[in-house]
Amino acid sequence: MTDEKSQVLIIGGGVIGAACAYYLAKSGRQVTIVEAGEFGKQCSHANCGLVCPSHALPLTEPGAVGKTIRSLFQQNAPFRIKPRWDPKLWVWFWKFARRCKKHHMLAAAKPRAELLFTSLSLYRLLMETELTDCEWETRGSLYVYQNEESFAKYAKTDQLLKEHFNLAAQRVDSAALEDMEPSLRPGLAGAWYYEVDAHLRPDRLMQAWRCVLTELGVTLVENQQVEGFVRQQGRAVAVKTSAGDIAADVFVVATGAWTPWLNKQLGCKIPIQPGKGYSMTMPRPEKCPTRPLLFPEHKVAVTPMQSGYRLGSTMEFAGYDTRIDPRRLQALRDGAEVYLQQPVCEPVQEEWYGWRPMTYDGLPVIDRTPAMENVLVAAGHNMLGVSMAPATGKIVTAMITGATPGIDPAPFSLRRF
Ligand SMILES: Cc1cc2nc3c(=O)[nH]c(=O)nc-3n(C[C@H](O)[C@H](O)[C@H](O)COP(=O)(O)OP(=O)(O)OC[C@H]3O[C@@H](n4cnc5c(N)ncnc54)[C@H](O)[C@@H]3O)c2cc1C
């Protein structure tokens, strides 16, 4: 617990660091964000922008292992592991595989759903008051299927989500789908509509956070990488950066996919792997979808934004590989082509990749570190960092101020590793 005058230093200026900074500054703390590059320019920059409670289930569904193994041999599979010698990655996958059972999946989905629903409510408030220029829309999302069998099979997942999380989708058959979403090609099998989902434009969200944080007096230090901590009697007193030490009373590590790089300093073994995803941003096509579309059979997401149009997704475990692989972008185009009348709209304005911070159990880490009790971690939000950011910021703030967190943080504990 800290008093109001205490100084909090947040490492990492992505959507998680920004949300933590916001609620901490609102609680009266003096906040500084130290960012290795530019604020908001990594994984939080050109993702698909969905704020989606419909994604409560983690990837560890029964049967996921078989799909993963098959993908090892497919160059263009939407889910791909680059075969290589990387013991940490293989241990990660072994642990992931062990969780691909229904009871594990539901156990992880419960705290995920809490983060997702709480964040959605918080976003609604923020969009009305402070984050007003993010192209926020509440039109739901549509899971569209090409194949009859896969479409029908989703009824089981729908039932599960309805039963456990009160997350019922509306079943849209082929004929109704053509009326509901004229941008789609005729003859698709059908879709499941989640009215609850919302979406926004991620780079606008980060710009809006930047403005709000500046107004709240948050100091932003860019282009300075944190390399370690200065410790005194079991506590951190400053971070070491390339440009010198920066002192504070409390520290929050919100470094996304890079978090394991600080494992040694933190005295932890945080098992985050970078899950590389791609997006392409274009002008809105003439036949633009009216709401976000997901094509689960091809693992492509389509986000119609007020000022643009984005195809995104794919999941590649290729380590910290910074190359843009044109085959992955082509896979996005090919996948969208199956469903949409106008899948792309030239000129492509941005081709992008981001490293999702993936944990093997699908849950983030929101906890104090064992080595230094005044250092917290808020990372590992997998495919849902945008959707889970406000609730994460609230939990971190409660842990620092001594308030009661609205959500039980136990499932996000570091002790589970
Ligand atoms: C293709 C794609 C589509 C996606 N779509 C969605 C979606 O629709 N909805 C959704 O909710 N999520 C989505 N995501 C996931 C989401 O983008 C991430 O979960 C989220 O951006 C993670 O935020 P973060 O703040 O943890 O990480 P980041 O945004 O990566 O921020 C971490 C920051 O820490 C900085 N940093 C790292 N190490 C240091 C250091 N030592 N010192 C200083 N700074 C450091 C980095 O430079 C970086 O800026 C998608 C991701 C991808 C790739």
Image (tube, rainbow, N blue to C red):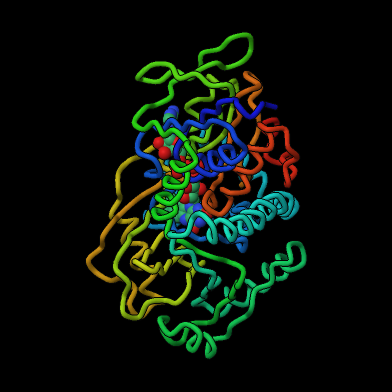
Viewport quadrant of the N terminus: top right
Query: Which residue is at 50% across, 68% downward?
Result: 137
Between 103 and 178, which is closer to the camera in this rendering? 178
Residue 365 position within the rendered picture, expressed as x and y whole percent measured from the top left: 62, 37
Which picture quadrant has residue 162? bottom right
Residue 68 position within the rendered picture, expressed as x and y whole percent measured from the top left: 52, 52
Query: Which residue is at 73% across, 37% downward?
Result: 403
In the rendered view, would you say 406 is above or below 294? above
Between 199 and 272, which is closer to the camera in this rendering? 199
Viewport quadrant of the C terminus: top right
Is any part of residue 68 visible from this angle? no
Residue 89 position within the rendered picture, expressed as x and y whole percent measured from the top left: 51, 36
In the rendered view, would you say 290 is above or below 247? below
Query: Which residue is at 43% across, 51% downward?
Result: 208
In the rendered view, would you say 277 is above or below 404? below
- Answer left or right for 10 relative to 343: right
Residue 10 position within the rendered picture, expressed as x and y whole percent measured from the top left: 51, 31
- Answer left or right for 57 relative to 258: right
The extreme left residue here reads: 347
Query: Which residue is at 51% across, 61% downward?
Result: 50
